[in-house]
Image (cartoon, grey):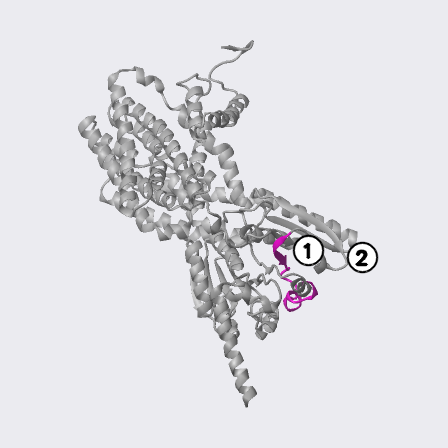
Amino acid sequence: MEWFGLNVHLPVSDPTWIFFLVLAIILFAPLLMSRLHIPHIIGLILAGLIVGPYGLNMLERDSSFELFGKVGIYYYMLMAGLELDLPNFARHRRRGILIGQLTFSIPFLMGWSIGLYVLHLPLLTSILLACIISSHTLVSYPIVGRYGVEKDVSVVLSIVATAFAVFTALLILAGIVGAHDAGSDGWFWVGFCAKFLLYVGTIIYAFPRLGRWFFRRYNDNVMQYIFVLALVFLSAALAELAGLEGLLGAFLTGLVINRLIPKVSPLMNRIEFVGNALFIPYFLIGVGMIINIRVLAEGSDSLWLMLVMVLTATVSKWVPAFLMQKLFGMSADSRRMMFGLTNAHAAGALAMVMIGTKMEIAPGQYLMSDAVLNGTVMVILLSCIISSLATEQAARDIAMSDASPDENRGSSHGRCLITYSNPATVEVLTQLAMMIRNPHIPDSMMGLSVAYDDEKGEKRLAQGKQNLAQAEKIAAAADIRMLTVSRVSNNIASGIVHTVKEYDVGEVVIGLHHKANIADSFFGLIVENLLKGTYREVMVARCLMPPGTWRKVIVAVPPKAEYEVGFYKWLEHLCRIGEQLGCRMHFHAPAETRRYISDYIAQLHENVRAEYSDLDDWDDLLLLTGEVNYDHLLVIVSARQGFISYAPSFERLPMQISKYFNNNSVLLLYPDQKGDPQENVSLFNPVHRATATHEMSGWLSKLSSLVKR
């Protein structure tokens, strides 16, 4: 064949041209699909069909597509596990298991009965067909991430259902293989169960501990990414040794290291970027290349078989979504979302097809015939198209219905300002700020470096610019824009205060190297002058390990903290940390304050795994020494002197932290406290004003009685 005067042999065999053609497809297919308002996933599958062996025969489905395709489907399952909201998962696990049973059993029974009694297929082939129809792949899950509705209950239920359906289908497939093996007997199942339990136990126990150990000791970006991929493929390989499919291993890895990788972090952004840019498109193109559209012209029998298989696969997945909607009073958008996510057949179906085409049940006769193979491939194509369209529509509608500015109550004022002075704390402070920042306002993060105006000012200014460049790079890796300001001042605190006023900053994060003298540093001149110069929220942080490795956040809240105007603001920040990390949060607070905390979390952050304990006497803070572990974050909510939640015992905080919590990550938090101390109570809600008025009248009556005496 000749293109523009050049002799080109098809299919293309030169690796350079192969990779160029694949990149061209990945680049231009989404652009074309965007103009046609069609999901990108469909474009990549159709592009694979066009350039594949059954289309223009430009590319052959060689070993590169098998390798990158396998990595792509592992990426799918890994990202599904990483992006799963575990607290939401735990809350809805019963409904998730129910829809998993429905979305597996109904398609399995329909596929088995239609294959046996309508298509007149052999028994084992009918069971294999039922397994293919009952399993599904989260092909359209990237659409959910693009609209930001991963936490919607219908998405969580669909992911739980996927795990249940795929695992059950693959388990039955393993039974088919074992039944076909003449030497298999009861001992086969004993060995299979033993290997399965050993595999799951090893992954659940070892991987989180290994990941936490690695992330604490190595902060190199490339090493962390390679480490995650190594865990995925190790888990997949061990799953295959246990008689399971590797994609289950990838999904399980995503679940067990979910809490080690915050949703807004450079590492998570790299995982998503590489997968969406290369491996996942490679997989989708490879799926399209195995589709043989020419079989439609082979005769009415083949067309009838494909039509029956496609209708069975579609209807059998719509019925469970409809039943779940009616059983639990869910919306039509939720039904479409569950149907869209559970309808696509790709990875599991392909794995089962490959097994069926290689298993010989009679001389010259295989478990999967050519007609059933072509029908299965058409099920894959059409189900992916239907799944993408349904998920796109549902995700758009859910995103529009969930968009409510009233839910953005916390840090809605100004940027989050991070002050950098020590190169060793740049990364942890930036990661902390990325979790608490308000994602709904532009330019939500701002880095600041203030250098003394003295003989070493130029050297300090250069070091400060290096710190800001490093912080900006970390934020950019998480796709977050950070403004940076470098200034010279005769007073560090004044430089910070002026920046807060000039740029309308909402909160300030200031760090401390963990080797510094804690008693002096927390209440040194810089922090004291900063607290006096601004009533904005100030967080003084000492992080001894990366935030992603914290297992628990312990919060000590003083009495009357709910009277401060910044109460809900700092509570919102802590809830964001809890949601990003998926770790438990234990609030130690007085009973009255605890009621406001629990109500706020229940209404706006139900996914936060919150626990509560009494802390009526601030001297009881020392009781936390037995609860705070080395991999916990201790948050101490304090207050500026002269405000209603301030207590004289706050003066002992430096000594207590230095003596009892010297080996712990600590965040000392000063909430927003606007205006004069006397005006502070009147800025809060009427309930608090009434309470404060009642207490004030009590004090006045006591004073009156003393005067009368």
Left or right, 642 with reference to 276: right
Q: Is residue 47 magenta?
A: no
Taking 697 as reference, is 597 above or below it?
above
Q: How many marks?
A: 2
Q: Quadrant of residue 524?
A: bottom right
* Spot occupied by residue 182 in the image (x, y as percentages of width and height): 23, 35
Q: Residues within 10 Å of mark 2 (few under 14, many from 20)?
A: few
* Spot occupied by residue 348 in the image (x, y as percentages of width and height): 35, 35
Taking 396 as reference, is 448 above or below it?
below
Taking 661 as reference, is 469 above or below it?
above
- Image disc number at residue 421: 1
The answer to whether any part of residue 661 appears in the image is yes
Looking at the image, which is closer to me, 191 or 385?
Answer: 385
- Quick one: quadrant of the C terminus? bottom right
Q: Quadrant of residue 185?
A: top left
* Spot occupied by residue 579 in the image (x, y as percentages of width and height): 47, 53
- Image disc number at residue 552: none
Under mark 1, the amino acid is Ser
Q: Is residue 513 magenta?
A: yes
**Element type at mark 2:** loop
Looking at the image, which is closer to me, 402 or 311?
Answer: 402
In the picture as drawn, the residue positioned furthest to the right comes out as: 455
Mark 2 and mark 1 lie on one chain; the one further toward the N terminus is: 1
Q: Residues within 10 Å of mark 1 (few under 14, many from 20)?
A: many
Q: Which residues are magenta?
A: 504-526
Taking 50 as reference, is 253 above or below it?
below
The answer to whether any part of residue 365 appears in the image is no
* Spot occupied by residue 695 in the image (x, y as percentages of width and height): 50, 75
Q: CA distance from mark 2 to mark 1?
A: 16 Å
**Element type at mark 1:** loop
- Image disc number at residue 454: 2
